[in-house]
Image (tube, rainbow, N blue to C red):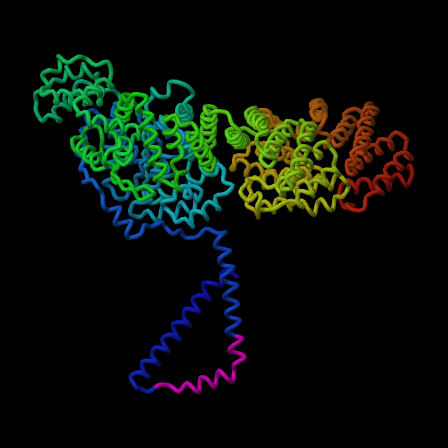
């Protein structure tokens, strides 16, 4: 019905326009005393057919109302054209008024890089032909990486058919702000002419990314985009952005310039690697710069990523050498516009480092003569040379630059003015003067903060300038400057403070304000986790905890640490799995702190610890935790807590083999479930509970009911847009297919589970899907490589310490060995399956029955061993109340008894269990039992 509303809206508009036109014409003719139509005939017509007239109007109005409501509901679910955020005319007028005269920067002098520049241009020519290129320009500090790349970009920007996006990695907080240089580059591209098309591409192909760029969309659209991005994993975000970049570059070549990648966040490096590994043709170049020296210490992520890409020839490194004496001579000739120069002296002092050379020449020019080059004291390093050039500045200029270094590589004069408690106009004037003289900084344009503050933005020429200036500031004064900058930014950003949480955490941390630093580190972690940038989130959580330990002990501190540990534990679940040591440690620490919080908050501890124990197959311990959770849930009487407690009870009892009790608890989950309690969570307990119902029903002897419910959980997860729920619901379907011997359906579901889990980054379900696919393929006579695939997947599960269902998975492997004729391996694997499931008794009867059948098949003289397995399976099934496994084991035992002359015993025991069933007579187990019973009833011969 939603589709009818646009047409009805046009109809109403047309009717309204027609009536308005006729009314204006009638009134005009009446006012000008011209002839007007007689309305009595129209009123008479309406009077004669009033029922039809009123009925039509009422019906059309009702239809329009229903269609409009349906259309609004449809709009909230589906992607819509974006309304790009625009400023009011007052804001635009205000933004145009800059307190600073624009600076026209002269072109930099570049020498000794002709071959490198030509190489970059050659690579870009191939990019325009459709060959993607990932290029890293490397070299020591001051070697000229920025000068070379900017010269290349300047030569490229003359072509209007090229898009260039620029992003800067920043040391102070860049390593903790996920995708910062990528987002910066994309935002700049979207603000350029034609940027609306890029916004539409991002909206269509990468909504999770566009949701992180609030300046490009309206508030309403951002909320809708966040809804569309719910459940998106990091792997999916990387794939979406890689595809979006390819689409952006389809018609117009795209260059992404990312500077100082040695300070990059890991997520940005992941995106670069994802783009590099794709084999599709793309007119895309990623050009990055980095310092090799920064990667020598520790396990730097850029080093590992670059080496892996180089191994597969997915990237190119352009290493810049030092300048030679001839290059120095060329520079001096160009700079001084005279032939007389002292290249040998300058070269000896600088060893060909371009930045060092520029600073030496600047210093000598300030001294008045190049003739003193041989007489100056040789500085030990480039920083000393920068110090000498700083001494040329006035004391006031030095103080302003030092304060600017606290604000960062890029800074606003508003921050510097507050840090120094000086008038803004004085700071602007000083920065303008320095930029015009090409001393240390360049203009970065006007910056507008959320509260409307407009101030000029500036950027240091080189990171070494900012680092050197920062190191000059006494520690006590740094604390004061960081605190003032942080307070200004916090006040100016107001409700938008989350956008700069990492930067504020850095400033407050260096200002020794541990409470504020911990708060903003936590916000930064939550922001990173929302972007699925889990490594950055983990680092921020750990930084927040470190700041928390610096605060005096109190109940409030314990409460805040408790929340941090819970969030950190949830993060470890996503990155390492429930059974990981870090996951357990986080929840154990939270349990220690639980005494300082209420029952409602402590529920998350029980759930976390329960999951770590159940995935490690410590089922009795998990049941104890489930009991505690149920008691806490009953005290709180919160529906979410009760639903969670019954889910925990149901799952622990399910794997312990207490099927009837498990089924009751899983049904109670639905009784207490409220959709709004789990709307924001990646998981949904109703989906999990319903997914187990078919297995429970089959075990309890109701196979028809199990088949009816087989796909219910999967369909529910798709309706709720819970991708984790979809893959979690797949494995119970596969288990049911295993029990029903529906191999083709099992393989189809397993293939979907494996693919979706790989796309979403769910390693446990990916490996389980791989095992199920290999097993089902072997059952369909595609045995080759199946056992090896399952063994590799089991090793992966061992690596992430996932032990649950190990008995079942080993049973599948044993079945593959049986199909391939490797009976000894199969027997060994069956024994491993039984040894691995001492507490996990759910699949033991099935495993015992299968082993008994293998013993008979392998050696007819092992009748006693096989009979023992069958009788053990029957005994355990009766203890656990599992009718279908009892029927299967009894059928196998009855065959053995028939073949050994004990037909009466076979008929008696098989008829007893068979007659218990009231449904499922078309399933394989009951058909085989019926056939055997008919044979036994006929008597021998």
Q: Nearer the viewer, residue 314 or 596?
A: 596
Residue 532 appears left or right of 216? right
**Total numbered labels:** 0
Identify the residue at horizontal 92%, vertical 38% (top origin). Answer: 939
Front residue (pair 297, 917): 297
Rendered position, 287 above or below 476: below
Residue 51 shown in magenta: yes
Looking at this view, is 124 or 938 the one in front? 124
Residue 548: x and y, percent? 47, 26
Residue 587 appearing in the image: yes
Within the magenta stretch, is there residue 172? no
Residue 568 visible in the shown view: no
Residue 210 location, quadrant: top left
* Vertical order, 693 against 37 (above or below): above
Residue 387 on image: x %, y %: 22, 20
Residue 652 placed where, x, y %? 69, 33
Q: Quadrant of the C terminus?
A: top right
Please report the bounds of the magenta region as a residue range: 36-55
Above-or-below relation of 81 to 363: below
Tell me where residue 623 appears, x and y as whole percent.
Answer: 69, 31
**In screen coordinates, is 561 left or right of 747?**
left
**Residue at left 51%, top 78%?**
53
Horizontally, residue 337 falls left or right of residue 542, namely: left
Dominant secondary-structure state across the stretch colored magenta: helix
- Front position in the image: 488 or 163: 488
């Amino acid at each position: 019905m939603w589709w009818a509303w646009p047409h009805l809206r046009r109809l109403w508009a047309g009717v309204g326009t027609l009536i308005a036109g006729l009314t204006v014409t009638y009134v005009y003719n009446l006012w000008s005393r011209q002839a007007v139509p007689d309305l009595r005939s129209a009123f008479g017509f309406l009077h004669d057919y009033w029922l039809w007239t009123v009925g039509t109007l009422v019906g059309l109005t009702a239809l329009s109302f229903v269609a409009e409501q349906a259309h609004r509901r449809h709009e909230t679910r589906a992607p819509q054209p974006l309304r790009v955020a625009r400023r009011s005319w007052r804001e635009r007028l205000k933004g145009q008024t800059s307190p600073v005269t624009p600076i026209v920067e002269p072109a930099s002098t570049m020498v000794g890089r002709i071959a490198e520049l030509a190489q970059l241009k050659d690579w870009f020519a191939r990019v325009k032909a459709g060959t993607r290129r990932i290029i890293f320009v490397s070299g020591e500090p001051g070697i000229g990486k920025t000068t070379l790349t900017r010269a290349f970009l300047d030569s490229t920007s003359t072509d209007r058919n090229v898009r260039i996006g620029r992003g800067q990695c920043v040391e102070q907080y860049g390593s903790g702000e996920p995708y910062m240089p990528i987002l910066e580059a994309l935002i700049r591209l979207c603000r350029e002419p034609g940027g609306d098309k890029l916004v539409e591409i991002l909206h269509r192909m990468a909504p999770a990314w566009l949701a992180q760029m609030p300046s490009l969309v309206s508030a309403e659209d951002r909320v809708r985009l966040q809804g569309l991005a719910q459940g998106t994993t990091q792997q999916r975000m990387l794939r979406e952005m890689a595809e979006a970049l390819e689409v952006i570059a389809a018609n117009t070549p795209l260059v992404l310039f990312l500077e100082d990648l040695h300070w990059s966040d890991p997520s940005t490096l992941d995106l670069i690697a994802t783009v590099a590994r794709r084999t599709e043709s793309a007119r895309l170049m990623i050009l990055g710069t980095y310092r090799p020296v920064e990667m020598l210490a520790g396990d730097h992520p850029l080093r590992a990523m670059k080496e892996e890409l180089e191994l597969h020839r997915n990237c190119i490194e352009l290493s810049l050498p030092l300048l030679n004496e001839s290059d120095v001579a060329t520079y001096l000739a160009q700079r001084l516009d005279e032939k007389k120069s002292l290249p040998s002296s300058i070269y000896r002092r600088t060893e060909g480092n371009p930045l060092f050379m520029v600073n030496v020449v600047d210093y000598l020019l300030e001294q008045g003569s190049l003739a003193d080059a041989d007489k100056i004291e040789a500085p030990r390093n480039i920083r000393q040379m920068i110090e000498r050039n700083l001494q040329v500045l006035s004391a006031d200029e030095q103080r302003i630059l030092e304060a600017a270094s606290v604000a960062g590589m890029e800074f606003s004069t508003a921050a510097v003015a507050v840090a120094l408690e000086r008038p803004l106009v004085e700071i602007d004037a000083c920065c303008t003067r320095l930029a015009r003289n090409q001393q240390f900084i360049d203009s970065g344009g006007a910056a507008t903060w959320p509260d409307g503050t407009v101030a000029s933005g500036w950027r240091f020429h080189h990171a070494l300038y900012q680092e050197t200036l920062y190191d000059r500031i006494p520690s006590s004064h740094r604390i004061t400057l960081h605190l003032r900058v942080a307070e200004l930014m916090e006040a100016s950003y107001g409700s938008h403070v989350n956008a700069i949480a990492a930067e504020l955490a850095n400033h407050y941390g260096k200002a020794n304000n541990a409470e504020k630093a911990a708060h903003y580190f936590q916000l930064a972690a939550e922001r990173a986790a929302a972007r699925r940038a889990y490594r950055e989130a983990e680092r921020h959580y750990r930084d927040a905890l470190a700041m928390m330990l610096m605060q005096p002990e109190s109940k409030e501190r314990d409460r805040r640490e408790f929340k941090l540990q819970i969030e950190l534990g949830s993060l470890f679940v996503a990155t390492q799995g429930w059974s990981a040591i870090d996951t357990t440690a986080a929840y154990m620490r939270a349990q220690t702190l639980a005494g300082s919080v209420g029952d409602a908050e402590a529920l998350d501890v029980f759930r976390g610890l329960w999951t770590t124990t159940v995935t490690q197959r410590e089922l009795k311990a998990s049941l104890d935790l489930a009991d505690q959770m149920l008691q806490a849930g009953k005290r709180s009487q919160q529906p979410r807590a009760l639903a969670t407690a019954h889910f925990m009870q149901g799952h622990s009892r399910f794997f312990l083999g207490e099927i009837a009790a498990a089924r009751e608890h899983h049904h109670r989950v639905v009784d207490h479930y409220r959709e709004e309690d789990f709307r924001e969570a990646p998981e949904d307990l109703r989906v999990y509970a319903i997914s187990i119902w078919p297995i429970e029903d089959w075990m309890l002897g109701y196979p028809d009911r199990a088949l009816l419910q087989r796909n219910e959980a999967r369909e529910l997860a798709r309706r709720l847009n819970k991708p984790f729920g979809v893959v979690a619901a797949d494995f119970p379907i596969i288990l049911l297919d295993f029990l029903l011997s529906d191999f083709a359906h099992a393989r189809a579901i397993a293939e979907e589970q494996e693919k979706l889990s790989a796309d979403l980054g769910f390693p446990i379900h990916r490996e389980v899907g791989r095992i199920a696919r290999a097993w089902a393929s072997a059952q369909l006579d595609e045995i080759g490589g199946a056992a090896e695939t399952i063994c590799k997947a089991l090793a992966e599960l061992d690596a992430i310490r996932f032990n649950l269902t190990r008995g079942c998975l080993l049973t599948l492997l044993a079945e593959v060995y049986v199909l391939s004729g490797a009976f000894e391996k199969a027997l060994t694997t069956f024994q491993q399956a039984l040894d691995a499931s001492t507490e996990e008794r759910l699949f033991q009867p099935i495993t015992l029955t299968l082993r008994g059948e293998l013993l008979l098949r392998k050696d007819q003289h092992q009748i006693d061993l096989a009979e023992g397995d069958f009788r053990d399976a029957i005994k355990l099934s009766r203890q656990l109340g599992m009718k279908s496994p009892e029927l299967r084991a009894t059928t196998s035992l009855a065959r053995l008894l028939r073949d050994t002359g004990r037909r009466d015993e076979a008929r008696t025991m098989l008829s007893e269990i068979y007659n218990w069933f009231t449904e499922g007579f078309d399933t394989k187990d009951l058909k085989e039992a019926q056939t055997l019973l008919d044979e036994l009833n006929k008597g021998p011969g």
